[in-house]
Image: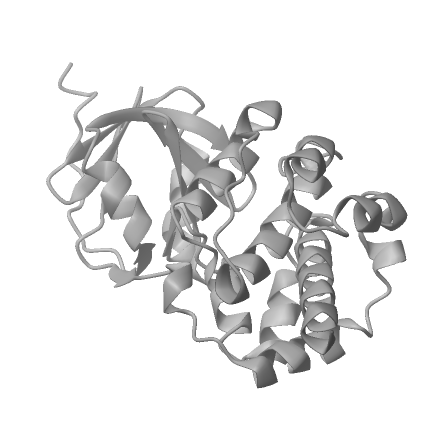
Amino acid sequence: MAELYRKYKDDKETGSISKLVLLYLKKYNTGYIHSVFNHSLNIRFGENLIHISGENRGLVSFGCSISEKKVKELILNVDIDNIVMKKGESLLFYKRSGIEKLNLSGLKTINLEIKNIKKSEGILKKIFEYLKNIDFNQKTGIKTDKVIKYLQNGITTESQKYLTGRGKGLTPSGDDILLGYGLVSCIYVENVKLIYGDLTTDISRQYFDAFNRGYVNQTLFELFSGNIENSVSNITKIGHTSGYDILFGIFLGIKNLLEKWRK
């Protein structure tokens, strides 16, 4: 047993952590590795996932961004279903060869609540003009004509049933489109809830949960704060089509909103 509990370094990690993660960790002390990818991993605590990725990949609504070196170290040394325990301000990753420790105390807490995004008609129109130049027909993961049809009256029960879980991948295109459209609605019209998380993947369900609690990814937060060109560039790098799917949802949300304002 002594070999299992090898001595680990207690260095404070640098980076950032979403305020939502701290709320999740208040409820649970024990979790497990849910999924491992080339550049990130997810830990399940109770019903929620916590995403860990490198600093240059952007902070997700339910995640922490740490050094690329530490992320690689974790990815190489953990397996799915390994136990993860919260102890004080650290996460302990239990595996056969020992324990990997992630000290969270040095991470900067970032508040990614949608309510903190300031409304600006000027920024909204600039985002719309910028997104008009993207050929979404070629970039999104599902046919755009059906999406436009189902979202012509906004996010409704019918549109959610059609779009939730529609498409391939860890976050199906329909889910990403709903998140993008829903964000525009939450900022400029009224709060919406994405109610069919049980019809999609674990990771999309987590994005829905974070959204319903009022949190979004940092890149989206920055987009609506006016950092348009850089934010769009970063968003388009998400997944195979996920970034473009989110932007298409945002584009449709703004388009429909501007049309209502003109009436």
Residue at image point 53% right, 46% down: 39
Farthest-out residue, front: 263
**x and y percentages locating residue 59 in the rendered image:** 43, 57
Locate the C terminus by quadrant.
Answer: bottom right
Residue at image point 25% right, 59% down: 107
Q: Quadrant of residue 76?
A: top left
Locate the N terminus by quadrant.
Answer: top left
**Residue 101 makes an appearance in the image:** no
Q: Quadrant of residue 99?
A: top left
**x and y percentages locating residue 221 in the rendered image:** 48, 66
Q: Across the whole image, how many numbered discs are drawn on residues?
A: 0
Farthest-out residue, bottom: 122
Q: Nearer the viewer, residue 221 or 115?
A: 115
Farthest-out residue, left: 88
**x and y percentages locating residue 3 in the rendered image:** 19, 21
**Residue 135 makes an appearance in the image:** yes
Residue at image point 57% right, 29% down: 196
Residue 129 lies, with reference to residue 14, above or below; the image says: below
Q: Nearer the viewer, residue 113 or 88?
A: 113
Residue 140 lies, with reference to residue 169, above or below; the image says: below
Q: How is the image coloured?
A: one colour
Q: Is residue 242 left or right of residue 99?
A: right
Q: Nearer the viewer, residue 165 or 18?
A: 165
**x and y percentages locating residue 86 in the rendered image:** 19, 34
Q: Nearer the viewer, residue 114 or 228?
A: 114
